[in-house]
Amino acid sequence: MNVNAMLSNGCGPWRCYPSGGVIAKTRPVNLPMVLLKAVGLLDDFLVRISPNVFALGCFVVLKKELSASRS
C-alpha cells in the first residue's frame, strides 16, 4: 500500500455500551443523561492523562494518492 500521508493518529475511549444485538433477551438499564455525560467526561479525562492504560482503541487516518495510470 502506497500511503502518502498520515492525517491523524490517536487513542480512543475505554467506555463501551452493551448492545442487545438483533434479539435482546435482557432489559436495558436506563441511566440519566447527566450520569452518562459525567461518565463520558471522566473517560475522556482518563484517556488524556494516561492513554497507555485507559485507551482500549486507536484510530489512524491515512491519505493515499491515486496515480493517473493504473497497470
Image (cartoon, grey):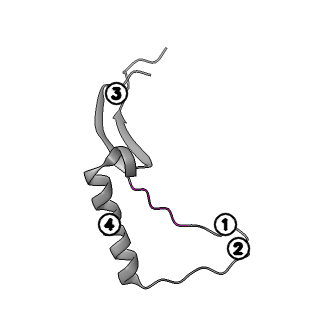
Q: Label 4, label 1: how many angstroms apart (C-alpha)?
A: 27 Å
Instruction: Quickly name the residue at label 2.
Output: 24
Which residue is drawn at the image coordinates 46% and 18% (left, top)?
A: 70
State which quadrant residue 47 falls in.
bottom left
User: What is the crowding at mark 4: few (fewer than 14 residues within 10 Å), some, or many (at least 20)?
Assistant: few
Residue 14 covered by magenta stretch: yes
- The label on residue 65 is 3
Going by the numbered disc 3, the residue's amino acid type is Glu
Residue 67 covered by magenta stretch: no
- Which is nearer the eye, 56 or 68? 56
Instruction: Quickly name the residue at label 1.
Output: 21
- Looking at the image, do the residues carrying marks 2 and 1 touch, with CB atoms under 8 Å apart? yes
Going by the numbered disc 2, the residue's amino acid type is Ala
Q: Position of residue 9 (x, y in %)?
A: 31, 40
Query: In the visual, does 2 lie left or right of 21?
Result: left
Tell me which label, 4 or 1, sits earlier in the chain: 1
User: What is the crowding at mark 1: few (fewer than 14 residues within 10 Å), some, or many (at least 20)?
Assistant: few
Tell me which label, 2 or 4, sits earlier in the chain: 2
Disc 3 is placed on an element classified as: loop
User: What is the crowding at mark 3: few (fewer than 14 residues within 10 Å), some, or many (at least 20)?
Assistant: few
Disc 2 is placed on an element classified as: loop
- The label on residue 42 is 4
Magenta extent? 13-17
